[in-house]
Amino acid sequence: MVICPIDSGRYGSPEMRRIFDEESRLSKMLSVEAAVAWAQAELGEIPREAAEEIGRKANTGYVKLERCKELDAQIGHDVMAVVKALTEACSGEGRRWVHYGLTSNDVLDTATGLQLKEASAIIRGKILALIRVLSDLAVEYRGLPMAGRTHGQQIGVITLGLKFAVWLREMMRHLNRFDECMKRALVGKILGAVGTGAALGPKALEVQALALKRLGLKPADMVTQVVQRDIHAELVSLIANIGSTLDKIGTEIRNLQRTEIAELMEPFESERQVGSTAMPAKRNPVRCEKVCSLAKLLRGMAVTAFENIPLWHERDLTNSANERFILPFSFILLDEMLDTMIRVLKGVVVYPENMRANLHRTGGLILSERVAGALVEKGMGRQEAHETVRRCSMEAYTTGVTFKEALLRNREVSSRLSPEEIESLLDPETYLGVALELVDKAVEATRRELEAYGSTLEG
């Protein structure tokens, strides 16, 4: 019986879900046991034939998930169940040395490091793919004017390319944060029960270094029985941060898809997609809504990750149960959100004619700032200009006259600005400031940063 929608396949790519499934988790735990035994043999701490036998049998071909579950049900300890199952699978000297000098979290936290290593590679690739899509959109719509809005109100002119460029640079910052975080997160720990390595003997640090190098991980900084949970909290909060940016993009597309605005729309498969059980004409922004919904869940997981930082003494189990949820769920949900947003932005529908109509909807009120600036340039004080234009704006709102008419009626304005000048000032498409330059700078900065990583915007 499937309860979780992740298990049903609704969320997350198959490759991401596979990293966190039970079989994969068991395989990684066994890889840790094998790597430690190999390192101990290399340093003369255990017989080489024992390490070779453990290495041969430390895989799910010999150690079955079902047997581990049987043992766990009997003894109430999931890691000892794996140790017992591996010991059963081994013969000769191998049986004697399984899990020698280790504690549960040497295996668990290092196996987690292996999962994070695989999962982070997938996430990084998708962040990079989204960056490339956003860069292409910023370039394509670099000069397409649209209304800028604050507090939900039109007040200023931007370009659609500028909006995409803002998101582009935000995702690039996330890529930088992600790479920095991975330097601390892709770690393991092989130092025994309280982090001293006592049971591993005087070569404990060498055993740890060799085993982790074989696994492709680095030793964690300072540990107790566990890798310190500030590392996991940083990672989960970063995932929530990335998810919140995707939420922001999704929310903006949803707003711009409103019937009354209709400037952007997420892709809709008209031949077969259904928007509503009741209303056949509906084209709902369901993909963006899914992204926004999952972002709420991600942010909640960050709270739990921070709660896991304070553990009793050298460790307790109050982090253990919830981490079985928050670590796989955070990666799987972000994976789903990235895939969804890439699909949305690759197929986003743009309505330039609606953008143009919306720019002119206020009859020039959107350019009140520009008029006030022009009055200052004609000799009026800045505060006086602001108040004069404010009064003209309110007249337009309350009486129904156009903003242009209200300006022409005002002696303080008409004595300084000719009708032709006012007409020119109220053309929104000529009030873009340095928007085009900003788009170019954003794309070029991203290109340079990716080249420093050994990547390109072209893919």
Image (cartoon, rainbow, N blue to C red):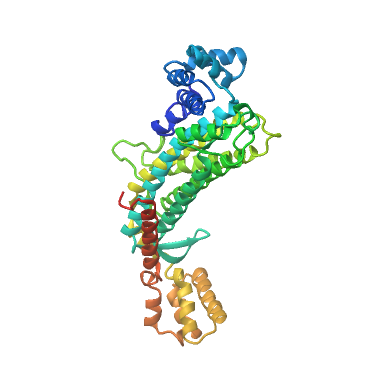
Which image quarter: residue 322?
A: top right
Q: Position of residue 301 (x, y in %)?
A: 57, 38
Q: Is residue 128 left or right of residue 97?
A: left
Asked whether residue 247 is in view, the answer is no
Which image quarter: residue 445?
A: bottom left
Pick the front one: 440 or 285 = 440
Q: Give the mark count.
A: 0
Residue at the far front: name it: 44
Residue at position x 47%, y 69% in the image: 400
Q: Position of residue 101 (x, y in %)?
A: 59, 25
Q: Position of residue 429 (x, y in %)?
A: 36, 69
Residue at position x 50%, y 85% in the image: 412
* Above/below status of 313 relative to 176: above
Q: Is residue 213 left or right of residue 161?
A: right
* Above/below status of 17 relative to 130: above
Asked whether residue 6 is in view, the answer is yes
Residue at the far left: name it: 271
* Above/below status of 166 relative to 52: below
Which image quarter: residue 108?
A: top right
Pick the front one: 63 or 210 = 210
Residue at position x 43%, y 76% in the image: 404
Q: Position of residue 160 (x, y in %)?
A: 38, 59
